[in-house]
């Protein structure tokens, strides 16, 4: 099933978007009883996501190796978080997955095929929303869509709780709202792989938690594979099935997170996991041994 | 309520206070005979001259001639500058080929070419067209080029990941992204356009506002000279307002130009 196959007349899609006009304040805690991921989850389920396989990938800029011998496979529909110190190569890895850059060694396979250039089924979201300031919000969401794009874009916008802001210029939106628009734009083409490069990095703590709930809800609903780069370990533990840590261009930790969703930050296991990953990140002795 | 509205009207009128006082003073000095008409005619005399010239059809004729010259020079020069700006902004090869030549030619003050231009074209229309076009070309060229090159790389990358074709890439991303800079160039070019035309018409012309002023000078008709000067000022102001209007319309998305939510 490619992203083109999906039609706006899809009844499930309509049901989802019409039934939920006020997703504005969906939080992690509210997500399960909002009823968004019952039928749709079965409908697009795991087969919507694409598998990602990274084999022996190395990337250099000039003489400096940024990534070395990276091996990682992500099953379809999984949510993987990548953490690591600043400059360790997280964004570089994401750009390889996106086809925005090519590895010097090794192979990157998405959906079984080597990545060659950017593919429509892959969408990437950055820390800055990158909205075109001269196009209205709705046009930004519908960027690159062909045919009768308006209802599709409007539905995607409604899904992130901004259905009434389609006629505004991006400049009048708040930072959090701009990121929501960027999320709607990323999801409007029904991606099978969503890459997120610190998408919530510039937001305040409260908005960030709201956005995490929104992303988690949409991921469960649409079943795409998600790769999230983040500095926030709590965010990684909240959202991901796996937390992968990169240090000096290598994977140094691959931690499965099996906590039931939605995850509560107040839970003891959550805090323990977060603490362990954090101390590993800070390279404090003692902490990591139990989890590697 | 009425006091508030009165103060609002007052606020709007305050900027005109000084100019009105100056005109009144000028009129007073001229009527009292302290200001010779050889130096400066009275405002009433200037108004009368303007009225007579309008009725005789002389003023509209010269105005139209000057306007057409300005416009055609602007279109030709601006068009060439815009095309080079686009080409050099979009293609590294084109930039390597033409940019340094443009930089060199820019350093020649175009008004210094007047003697040569008169030798080439005489005082025909081509002379004025050439000079105006030359003067207008560079600001448009540089601002178009600069505007394209300074478009946010993140936006370009984003647009590429959305598989925009080169046509929609141009219309949806590159042109609107460069437009604020291009319009700065347009405003700057409009200033140069009038200045060039004033000089060219004063030196070498057989019609136009500058020509009207120069013939008036020969007959010591200071009132007509002042009318011409005021006309140039009004035309310059009109062009500037047009450019501002264009900015407001084209850049309504821009927080600095737009009127908020349209
Ligand atoms: N285009 C490039 N040319 C040269 N060096 C680059 C380029 N892109 C990235 N690098 C280098 O590669 C290293 C990793 O960069 P990358 O952006 O992947 O880091 P990161 O892990 O995303 O960091 P951060 O968390 O701060 O975003 C850095 O040292 C950076 O200087
Ligand atoms: Mg980064």
Image: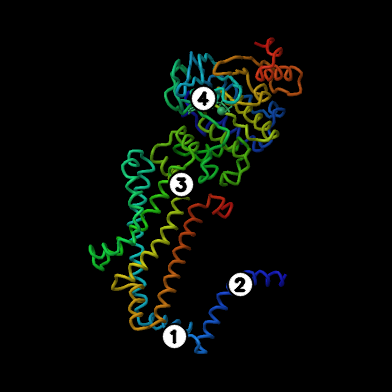
Q: Are marks 3 and 4 on the same chain?
A: no
> Which residue position is annotated with label 4?
A92
* Residue B70, position as x, y percentages in the image: 36, 64
* Residue A258, position as x, y percentages in the image: 67, 15
Chain letter of disc 4 in the image = A
Q: Find numbered disc 2 in the image and state the secondary structure of the residue it sits on.
A: helix
> Which residue position is annotated with label 2?
B13
* Residue B2, position as x, y percentages in the image: 71, 72
Residue B26 as seen in the image, left or right of residue A282: left
Q: How crowded is mark 4: few (under 14 residues within 10 Å), some or many (20 or more)?
A: many
Q: Which mark is residue B176?
A: 3
The nearer-to-camera label among 2 and 3 is 2
Q: Residues within 10 Å of mark 2 (few under 14, many from 20)?
A: few
Task: Measure the alpha-carbon separation of dots 1 and 3.
Answer: 53 Å
Query: Which corner quadrant holds the C terminus of chain A?
Result: top right
Mark 1 in CB contact with mark 3 (< 8 angstroms):
no
Task: Measure the alpha-carbon separation of dots 2 and 4.
Answer: 61 Å
Label located before the other in sequence (2 or 1): 2
Q: Is residue B23 above or below residue A246?
A: below
Label located before the other in sequence (2 or 3): 2
Disc 4 beta carbon < 8 A from ligand 1?
yes
Q: Can residue A212 be seen in this view?
A: yes
The nearer-to-camera label among 1 and 4 is 1
The nearer-to-camera label among 3 and 4 is 4
Mark 2 in CB contact with mark 3 (< 8 angstroms):
no
Task: Measure the alpha-carbon separation of dots 2 and 1.
Answer: 31 Å
Residue positioned 34% across, 62% down in the render = B111
Q: Is residue B208 above or below residue B136?
A: below
Q: Can residue A192 be seen in this view?
A: no
Q: Residue B141 carries which label?
A: none
Q: In this view, does B232 lie above or below A253?
A: below
Q: Which of B56 and A219 is in front in this view?
A: B56
């Amino acid at each position: 099933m490619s992203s083109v196959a999906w039609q706006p007349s899809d009844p499930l899609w309509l049901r989802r978007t019409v039934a939920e006009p006020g997703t504005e304040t969906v939080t992690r805690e509210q997500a399960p009883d909002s009823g968004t991921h019952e039928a749709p989850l079965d409908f697009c389920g795991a087969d919507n996501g694409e598998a990602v396989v990274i084999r022996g990938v190395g990337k250099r800029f000039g003489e400096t190796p940024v990534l070395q011998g990276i091996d990682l496979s992500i099953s379809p529909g999984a949510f993987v978080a990548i953490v690591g110190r600043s400059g360790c190569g997280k964004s570089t890895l994401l750009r390889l997955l996106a086809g925005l850059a090519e590895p010097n060694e090794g192979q990157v396979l998405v959906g079984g095929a080597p990545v060659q250039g950017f593919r429509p089924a892959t969408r990437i979201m950055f820390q800055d929303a990158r909205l075109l300031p001269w196009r209205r919000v709705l046009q930004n969401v519908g960027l690159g869509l062909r045919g009768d794009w308006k209802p599709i874009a409007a539905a995607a916008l409604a899904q992130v709780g901004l259905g009434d802001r389609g006629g505004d210029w991006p400049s009048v939106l708040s930072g959090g709202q701009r990121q929501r628009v960027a999320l709607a734009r990323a999801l409007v083409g029904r991606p099978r792989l969503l890459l997120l490069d610190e998408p919530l990095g510039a937001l305040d703590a409260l908005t960030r938690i709201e956005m995490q709930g929104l992303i988690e809800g949409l991921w469960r609903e649409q079943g795409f594979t998600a790769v999230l780069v983040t500095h926030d370990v709590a965010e990684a533990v909240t959202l991901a099935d796996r937390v992968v840590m990169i240090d000096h261009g290598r994977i140094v930790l691959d931690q499965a997170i099996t906590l039931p969703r939605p995850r509560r930050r107040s839970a003891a296991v959550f805090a323990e996991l977060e603490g362990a990953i954090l101390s590993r990140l800070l390279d404090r002795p003692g902490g990591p041994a139990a989890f590697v | 309520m009425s006091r508030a509205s009165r103060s609002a009207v007052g606020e709007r009128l305050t900027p005109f206070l000084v100019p009105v006082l100056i005109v009144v003073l000028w009129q007073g000095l001229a009527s009292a005979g302290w200001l010779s008409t050889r130096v400066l005619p009275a405002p009433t005399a200037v108004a009368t001259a303007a009225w007579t010239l309008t009725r005789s059809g002389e003023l509209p004729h010269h105005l139209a001639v000057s306007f057409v010259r300005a416009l055609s020079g602007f279109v030709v020069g601006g068009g060439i500058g815009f095309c080079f700006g686009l080409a050099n902004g979009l293609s590294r090869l084109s930039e390597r080929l033409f940019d340094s030549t443009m930089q060199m030619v820019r350093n020649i003050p175009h008004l210094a070419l007047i003697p040569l231009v008169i030798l080439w074209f005489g005082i025909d229309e081509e002379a004025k067209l050439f000079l105006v076009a030359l003067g207008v070309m560079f600001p448009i060229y540089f601002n178009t080029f600069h505007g394209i090159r300074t478009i946010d790389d993140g936006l370009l990358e984003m647009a590429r990941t959305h598989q925009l074709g080169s046509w929609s890439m141009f219309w949806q991303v590159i042109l609107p992204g460069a437009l604020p800079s291009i319009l700065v160039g347009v405003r700057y070019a409009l200033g140069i356009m009038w200045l060039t035309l004033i000089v060219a018409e004063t030196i070498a012309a057989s019609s136009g506002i500058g020509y009207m002023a120069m013939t008036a000078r020969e007959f010591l008709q200071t009132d007509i000279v002042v009318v011409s000067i005021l006309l140039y000022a009004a035309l310059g102001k009109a062009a500037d307002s047009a450019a501002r209007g264009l900015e407001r319309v084209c850049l309504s998305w821009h927080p600095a130009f737009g009127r908020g939510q349209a």
